[in-house]
Image (cartoon, rainbow, N blue to C red):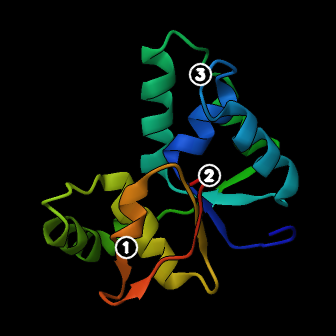
Amino acid sequence: MRGAANVLVDTGPLVAWLSADDAYHDWTKEQFARLRPPLTTCEAVLSEVVFLLHRAGKSVEAVPQLIQRGVLQVMPVLQSEAPAIAALMRKYSDVPMSLADACLVRLSESIVHAVVFTLDTDFSFYRRRGRSAIPVLMPY
């Protein structure tokens, strides 16, 4: 996976990496050390990260710093892809699919050789373009 330029990072790995007491902290720390920045994400993921860190009583200052330092690049997907994102959320309403997950699935459809770095097993069910499994980097 080293050198993979098309890694899309989900909420779980970011929260785990920034929370030393998280069960997946060590695993995500190892993955971030192996992956070449910038990793791609979306604003919906960052919103979830900040919410979860704040709720856990953690500092949220690191989140914008990851963008400033070039560890993360934020792709604006919601404005241009709202109809497709809404369709994904309808299709997977039984899961239910979060806005962040829908944005990442849509990004995975538009970025060549994208791999989703996640702790969310729902990505095993989601499909690109309705039929293709999404390559994932997960601990299980």
Q: How many neighbours does mark 3 have within 10 angstroms: few (below 14), some (14-19), or many (20 or more)? A: some
Is residue 70 visible in the rendered image? The answer is: no
Whichever of labels 2 and 3 marks the residue nearer the N terminus, that label is 3
> For the image shown, how many numbered marks are present on the structure?
3
| Amino acid under disc 1 | Ser
- Identify which residue is drawn at 41% across, 64% down: 123
Residues at marks 3 and 1, CA–CA distance in whole angstroms: 28 Å
Residue 15 position, x and y percent, is 57, 33
Quadrant in which the C terminus is drawn:
bottom right
Is residue 91 visible in the rendered image? The answer is: yes
Disc 2 vs disc 3: Cβ atoms closer than 8 Å?
A: no
Residue 116 position, x and y percent, is 56, 65
Residue receiving disc 2 = 139
Q: How many neighbours does mark 2 have within 10 angstroms: few (below 14), some (14-19), or many (20 or more)? A: few
Quadrant in which the N terminus is drawn:
bottom right
Q: Which mark is residue 57?
A: none
- Identify which residue is drawn at 51% across, 83% down: 110
Whichever of labels 3 and 1 marks the residue nearer the N terminus, that label is 3
Looking at the image, residue 12 sits to the left or right of residue 101; the answer is right
Q: Is residue 101 above or below residue 111?
A: above
Residue 47 position, x and y percent, is 44, 38
Whichever of labels 1 and 2 marks the residue nearer the N terminus, that label is 1
Residues at marks 2 and 3, CA–CA distance in whole angstroms: 24 Å
Q: Secondary structure at mark 3?
A: loop
Q: Is residue 21 above or below residue 103?
A: above
